[in-house]
Structures are given as C-alpha cells and as structure tokens.
Image (cartoon, rainbow, N blue to C red):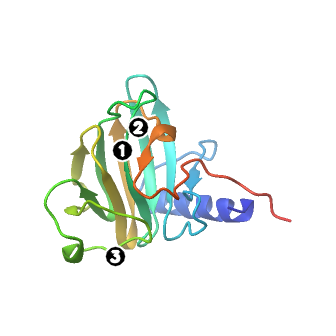
Amino acid sequence: MKRSEYVRMEKLAREYFKKANIVVREDEPVEVADFGLGMVEKVGLQLCVYINTERVCAKEMVLLPHQTCPEHKHVDSYGQQGKEETFRCRYGKVYLYVEGEGKKDEIGALLPETDTTVYHEIVLNPGEQYTIMPGTLHWFTSGDEGAVISEFSTMSTDETDVFTDNRIVRAPMIEEDM
C-alpha cells in the first residue's frame, strides 16, 4: 500500500471514530491493515489499540461500507488456541460470521473477495455484542454505513493469526510514494 493511501485510510477511520463519539487522540496511532491484497477499501481494517498486555487487550476497529476483515482464527506463537474476544458494535451494522450452522447463499452481507468457509451469521447493531471463543474461525464485514467496533479481549497476537485465504499478509507493507 502506498503511504498516501495509508494516510487517507487513517483519516477516514478517525472520521468514523468521531461519528461513533469515540475519542481517539491525535497521538494515538491508527493502523491500516490491507492484508496484502491491494484492495483495502474492500478487504481491510483500521484499528487503534489502547492496551495490549499479557492479560488484556482493548481496541477500536473501523470498517468502511462493505469492507471485510477476512476469515481467520487466533492462535498463539505455539500454535495453540489464541485470544477470546468480545465485539461490541458502536456505530453502523456488523455482520459477523463464525463456525456453526449457516449457508453461504443465505447470508445478509456481501461475500468478500477472499476465501470463506463459515457462515453462521450474527448481526450486531449499536450496543449489541458477541464473544468469540479462542480458536474459532470468523470473519466480519459492515453494512452500507460502515461500522465501528470496540474489541475487548485477552492478549492479542495478530501476527500469529491463521487466515483461510493463503494470499493474506497481516502486517501492512507501506511503500513510499514517488
């Protein structure tokens, strides 16, 4: 991703935090994850991590309209089940897909341009929340307005996430503009 695109997406994320009445200070970094696919507005996620210790993590996440965080599960650096996380919708609508019953052709959201295998749908509106247990495959996307999600979890080690789509690269690679 070009640096100018990264900066543009970070600015958009900050606008969404304001829409959700969430204060993110200017000195708090907002990460833009494009998952290495070069289509960040379709497959991407913007996030601000407040705290991430050995016991607890808290972050805010932004999805632009119909932007998707691709299917993955959390594992630790030893390949064991990773974090437990609770998503709380603050703005917009979140379509969360986890393991369980559900069919691909019956979901309420648009299918992403990445590989998916789980279709048990949980729809979160502002004030609603859902807890994802460790080792659970999941992916999530937003509706027409985009979404802001607060995440509360045990320690986050995003660099060890396992993605269903083998094209995914979790760490953003920023290219300087020419």
Q: Residues within 10 Å of mark 2 (few under 14, many from 20)?
A: some
Residue occupying the far front of the picture:
166
| Mark with earlier residue (2, 1) | 2
**Cβ atoms at labels 2 and 1 below 8 Å apart:** yes
Question: What distance separates the C-alpha of mark 3 from that of mark 1?
Answer: 23 Å
> In x, y percent, where is residue 42?
49, 71
Question: Splitting the image into 4 quarters, where does residue 133 fall?
Answer: top left
- Vertical relation: 120 (above or below) 74: below
Residue at image position (40%, 70%) is 112
Q: Nearer the viewer, residue 133 or 87?
A: 133
* Residue that mark 3 sits on: 110
Q: Nearer the viewer, residue 19 or 50?
A: 50
Question: What distance separates the C-alpha of mark 2 from that of mark 1?
Answer: 6 Å
Residue at image position (54%, 57%) is 35
Mark sitting on residue 58: 2
> In x, y percent, where is residue 26?
62, 47
**Quadrant including the C terminus:** bottom right
* Residue that mark 1 sits on: 151
**Cβ atoms at labels 3 and 2 below 8 Å apart:** no
The kind of residue tagged 1 is Glu
